[in-house]
Image (cartoon, coloured by chain):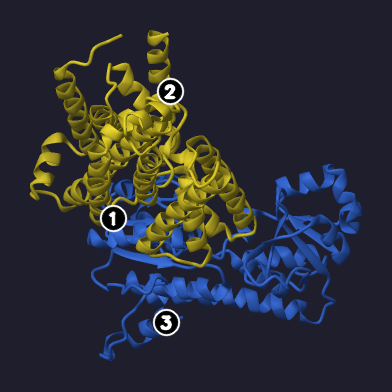
Chain colours: A yellow, B blue
Amino acid sequence: MRRFRAWYWLALGAALLAISVIAVASGAVNVPLGAVIDALRGHGDPTAIAIVRDLRLPRVVLGALVGAGLGASGAALQGALRNPLAEPYLLGVSGGAAVGAVIAFAFGATSDAVITLAAFVGGIAAVFIALAVARVGGRSTRTDMRTLLIAGVIVGSFANAAIMVALANASPNNIRGALWWMMGSAVDATWSRAGWLALSLLVAGGALVYFAREIDVLSLGEDAAASLGVGVERAGRRAFLISALIAAATVAAAGLIGFVGLVVPHIARAMGLRAHRPLILASALVAATLVVAADLAARTVDAPTELPLGAITALLGVPFFLIQLRRIA
Amino acid sequence: MLGLSLAACGESSREAHVLRDDFGNPIQLGPVPTRIVSLSPATTEILFTIGAGSRLVGRSRYDLWPDSARLVPDLGDGMRPNVEAVLGARPDLVVLYASPDNRNAADRLRAAGINTLALRMDHIAQFKGATGLLGAVLHDSARAQTVIDSVQNTLDSVRRATATLPHPTVFWHIWDSPLITIGSGSFMNELVEIAGARNVYADIQGASGQIALEDVARRNPDFILAGPDGSRQISSDPRWRIVRAARAGKIIVVDTGVVARPSVRLGEAAVSLARALHPGLFR
């Protein structure tokens, strides 16, 4: 097994920085590097300034934040639920958020803030439904983690079915908006959106890092955790809720971006990380890099057409993951 | 229509008559725009017809008429346009379809200081309003008015010619799975009426709606209107045999490039529909 070395942190940070610089310097329009640097400082051609400062920069920042959130949330969930297949979207968050957004669309909401808020509320609602189901379904009043996982998946499927029904007879304009959102995209990135996401990540991500020791113990198994004096049920529920909160915030900010939360924690573990505090941080860094790279591809490969970011993350990430998987095996 | 009335008032009225587009945003009537991006087929057709075609620096993928429009750079499908690509064309006027999907792009373009015009083009009246507005922005209201009048004259003469004829019922086939037709909220419904026919689905309030094939059979239209692909589908698919008009081969093939756009060729569209529905007319 590989050992994680301190300089890996430097490499992970450098990779994120490098891809971010490339992402700000490239796009559908060719802006020379010198003009990009001038534009960042607010000098030169107003069109270049608008492109670099109002379009590309918030977009790269939002992409990195979405990635960081999904990576951290996935790492914490896989540990707390002791399931390598756990991911933020498996817990009904994505389906719930999509229902929230689609309901907002159906009522003719066009305001960005309203749709974002509706998606966030929908995601959180789905999580609470899953939690309630897991409590009833489990023995006595305990929250059983396996039941929770199943409940999340089922709530998610129900949400997806509800969306299909809602979209079947919606007007083409509304369908388009909802579909775009379900495919995931950072195209609507603004500084205020990035700011809200950064704030929620700072609070919830900080909480995850703070409770990372509990997740370490949970990942040993419920009985072991109980014998080590950790309140298994409360600790599990806490990790689940915080992770779901982060996932809902990312979904509200950029729609559904699959695969990242599932696979990036495996990549981080393959680098030799076991303890959840560094694992969550490394997952956040790797996922941020992946999403920024995927978004760069989404907006340049077939420019001026934008490709769905949620699909690109998988297209880029899967080969990388398969190589890792072979190495471990 | 607002555009027309204002253009007529000109500079004489100082009242706070601010021109607004269909997103409710004020329109600047500054210098004549010289670099225009038009992201919908209808507005591109109007711009070419009022003589601004040579000033177009960007269009949508579907803007293929007139032929010279093909020489204008393609900036994507015109819905949720790539703002960076639009800015890269360095336009001083951007015209796009006023769909909720395009609101974000319009806001961003305005924030970048570019005069942006979002126009809804779902009715014949909106075609006239949009043409008047574009004429005002281009400082060529006279030419815009000529285009509006010539289209209106043709539509009026078709309406007069068909008014006394018996009105057959029609079903307009837009899409096959799911089966979609036009409702009374579409300019195509207006065209059907002008051409002297009745849409069997005029009870659908919106521009279009999803329906069941059995219901088409029950409403029993005299004619089916469909594009080339749709008509092939209808004649080859055995399920359509339950509709009498399909069995009898009473399918009118329409040129979707002409009849599916609320634009300068509305007159041509009305004439071609009237001819197909009332053989012998306009000989």
Q: Secondary structure at mark 3?
A: helix
Instruction: For mark 3, name the chain.
Output: B
Image quadrant occupied by the C terminus of chain B: bottom right
Do marks 3 and 1 share a subunit? yes
Instruction: For mark 1, name the chain.
Output: B
Do marks 2 and 1 share a subunit? no
Front residue of B29/A1: it is: A1
User: Which-is-in-front pick, marks 2 and 1?
Assistant: 2
Circle 1 is placed at which residue position? B91
- Residue A296 seen from this side: no
Q: Position of residue A25 (x, y in %)?
A: 20, 36
Q: Position of residue A24 (x, y in %)?
A: 21, 38
Amino acid at the residue labelled 2: Val
Front residue of A252/B193: it is: A252
**Horizontal side, residue B35 vs residue A312: left or right:** left
Front residue of A35/A247: it is: A247
Whole-angstrom CA distance, mark 2 to mark 1, is 40 Å
Amino acid at the residue labelled 1: Pro
Q: Quadrant of residue B248?
A: bottom right
Look at 15% across and 40% down and name the residue there.
A36
Q: Which mark is residue A318?
A: 2
Instruction: For mark 2, name the chain.
Output: A
Q: Position of residue A91 (x, y in %)?
A: 48, 42
Whole-angstrom CA distance, mark 3 to mark 1, is 25 Å
